[in-house]
Image (tube, rainbow, N blue to C red):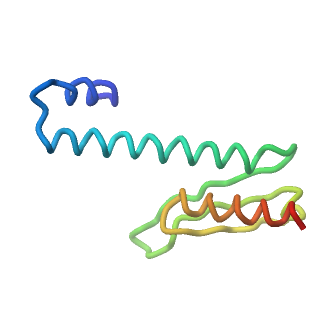
Amino acid sequence: MTLIDDVLAILDVSATNGQLAKLAELFAKQAEAVECWELVERLTADEGDSVEVLHEPYDFGVSPAVECNGTWTDWEDRRFTGGTRLTALRAAVAAMDKAKEG
């Protein structure tokens, strides 16, 4: 079932609280995915800058991470971690903004 199928099924006037909660969860996931992509776009806006999104090996107790390389890192790989990919990307953007200010 696709996201739109889920939304259409939930929008039935007889939707239960559980279905409405599921709809809210779907929209939150979509908003998070959009924010992640916007942060990747910011991190790769300058020519040659790159971002590698590393997998989330929760079973090994390792935090999600991204690695960035570009003018603002002096072309050295820099790793940023967080509780989620989104927080790792936010940390990278904050570091990039700070590096570009100074």
Q: Image point 70% across, 58% down: which residue?
A: 93
Q: Quadrant of residue 1?
A: top left
Can you say whether 47 is above or below 84 in the image? above
Residue 30 place in picture, x, y as percent: 44, 40
Could you tell whether 53 is left or right of 4 in the image?
A: right
Quarter where residue 98 is shown: bottom right
Q: Nearer the viewer, residue 47 or 12?
A: 12
- Disc count in the image? 0
Q: Residue furthest bottom?
A: 61
Q: Is 17 situated left or right of 28 in this image?
A: left
If the image is split into quadrants, where does the C terminus sit? bottom right
Q: Is residue 91 left or right of residue 17?
A: right
Q: State which quadrant residue 21 falls in.
A: top left
Up-down relation of residue 38 to residue 6 (above or below): below
| Image coords of residue 19 (percent x, y) | 17, 39
Q: Position of residue 78 (x, y in %)?
A: 75, 67
Q: Residue furthest front?
A: 13
Q: Residue at x 59, y 63 (%)?
A: 88
Q: Residue at x 50, y 73 (%)?
A: 62
Using the image as rendered, state which of residue 37 and residue 16 is in the foreground: 16
